[in-house]
Image (tube, rainbow, N blue to C red):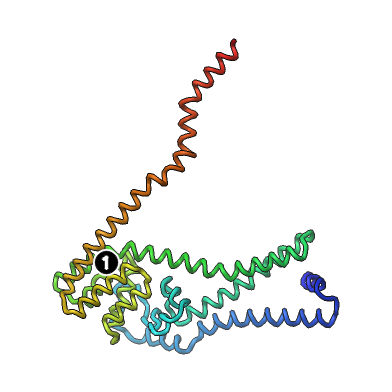
């Protein structure tokens, strides 16, 4: 507190203004902490969420995946009309956070992070009295910005990690979906079968396919459920598959043929991407060869000759 008063003394020396400033800062801090804790508490004691939990435990739905790896749809599904129009909800959905309190929890974490880092910095700065007031204010502003940006950066990393896992599992799911549909299963049954088979090797993609099947059983239109999966995952590959299926259903062509053609195109695309990555290897290896391998090679090959020359010169 004395440190804060000392900072305020650099701007004004009036005792009344100092008292008002301290009261305002204390009030804002308490308000921000209360709002952050309130968001977390409301997400935990939400009566709608508690009722849905009780319904989940009291009823046995047929949309549950084998191995009871999936929770109720009400815990993992927000209506598309809500999160498709919100950038934050879309990012949270892409990261795998689809509960009703996900957005409130995210904002609460950002608020607490924005308050926590400046407070920690304030306590640390007190151990360095040689720091000037201006430098201290810069540190507080920097830590405030860091506390605001950090949750968003972590969310971006979670999105990238989840998309990578979905992308790795999509080729297997596509091949299995082609086999299931060509063997005579309907699209809904094929999705359920693929979700069951991928529940261990690719649980993220299996959960998405299971959610599609559950939405269809709850009355959502089949193409809308597939579009919701494309929006939730944020992958261009899945969006392309949904577009192909939409055109197939609209024009009455065979779904099996559509999946077969898309599978071949997707396989060609993966091959082209692998060839592109292989073509870049020679360029990427220039810098390691130049700065790491070439000096060592030069030292091993030319070093003994140089030492021999120096020895001869020293004898003459």
Q: Nearer the viewer, residue 103 or 90?
A: 90
In the orientation shown, which residue stands out farthest toward the top? 316
Q: Nearer the viewer, residue 254 or 250?
A: 250
Give the residue at mark 1: 173
- Quadrant in which residue 255 is drawn: bottom left
**Mark 1 neighbour class, 10 Å CA radius: few under 14, some 14 to 19, many 20 or more:** many
Is 273 situated left or right of 289 in this image? left
Task: Identify the residue shown where x is 45% and y is 66%.
Answer: 158
Q: Nearer the viewer, residue 199 or 178?
A: 178
Q: How many marks?
A: 1
Is 294 situated left or right of 314 in this image? left
Task: Identify the residue shown where x is 16% and y is 70%.
Answer: 257
Q: Position of residue 163 (x, y in %)?
A: 38, 66
Q: Position of residue 108 (x, y in %)?
A: 56, 77
Against 145, is 300 above or below?
Answer: above
Q: Position of residue 244 (x, y in %)?
A: 24, 73
**Secondary structure under badge 1?**
helix
Task: Identify the residue shown where x is 49% and y is 20%.
Answer: 305
Against 130, is 189 above or below?
Answer: below
Q: Quadrant of the C terminus?
A: top right
Q: Position of residue 234 (x, y in %)?
A: 38, 71
Q: Quadrant of the N terminus?
A: bottom right
- Quadrant in which residue 127 is drawn: bottom right
Is 91 situated left or right of 168 in this image? right
């Amino acid at each position: 507190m004395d440190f804060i008063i000392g900072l305020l003394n650099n701007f004004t020396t009036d005792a009344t203004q100092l008292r008002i400033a301290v009261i305002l800062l204390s009030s804002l801090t308490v308000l921000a902490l209360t709002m952050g804790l309130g968001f977390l508490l409301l997400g935990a004691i939400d009566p709608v969420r508690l009722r849905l939990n009780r319904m989940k435990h009291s009823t046995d739905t047929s949309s549950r995946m084998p191995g009871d790896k999936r929770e109720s749809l009400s815990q993992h599904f927000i209506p598309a009309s809500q999160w498709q129009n919100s950038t934050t909800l879309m990012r949270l959905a892409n990261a795998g956070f689809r509960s009703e309190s996900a957005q409130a929890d995210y904002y609460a974490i950002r608020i607490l992070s924005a308050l926590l880092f400046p407070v920690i910095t304030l306590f640390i700065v007190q151990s360095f009295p040689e720091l000037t007031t201006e430098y201290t204010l810069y540190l507080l502003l920097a830590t405030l910005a860091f506390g605001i940006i950090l949750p968003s950066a972590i969310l971006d990393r979670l999105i990238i990690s989840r998309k990578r896992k979905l992308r790795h599992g999509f080729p297997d799911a596509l091949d299995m979906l082609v086999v299931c549909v060509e063997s005579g299963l309907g699209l809904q049954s094929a999705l359920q079968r693929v979700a069951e088979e991928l529940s261990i090797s690719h649980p993220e993609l299996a959960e998405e396919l299971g959610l599609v099947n559950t939405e269809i059983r709850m009355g959502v239109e089949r193409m809308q459920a597939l579009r919701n999966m494309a929006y939730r995952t944020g992958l261009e590959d899945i969006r392309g598959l949904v577009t192909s299926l939409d055109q197939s259903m609209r024009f009455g062509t065979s779904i099996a043929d559509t999946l077969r053609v898309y599978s071949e195109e997707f396989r060609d695309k993966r091959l082209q991407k692998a060839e592109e990555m292989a073509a870049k290897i020679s360029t990427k290896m220039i810098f390691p060869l130049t700065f790491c391998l070439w000096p060592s090679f030069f030292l091993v090959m030319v070093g003994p000759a140089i030492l021999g020359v120096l020895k001869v010169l020293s004898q003459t």
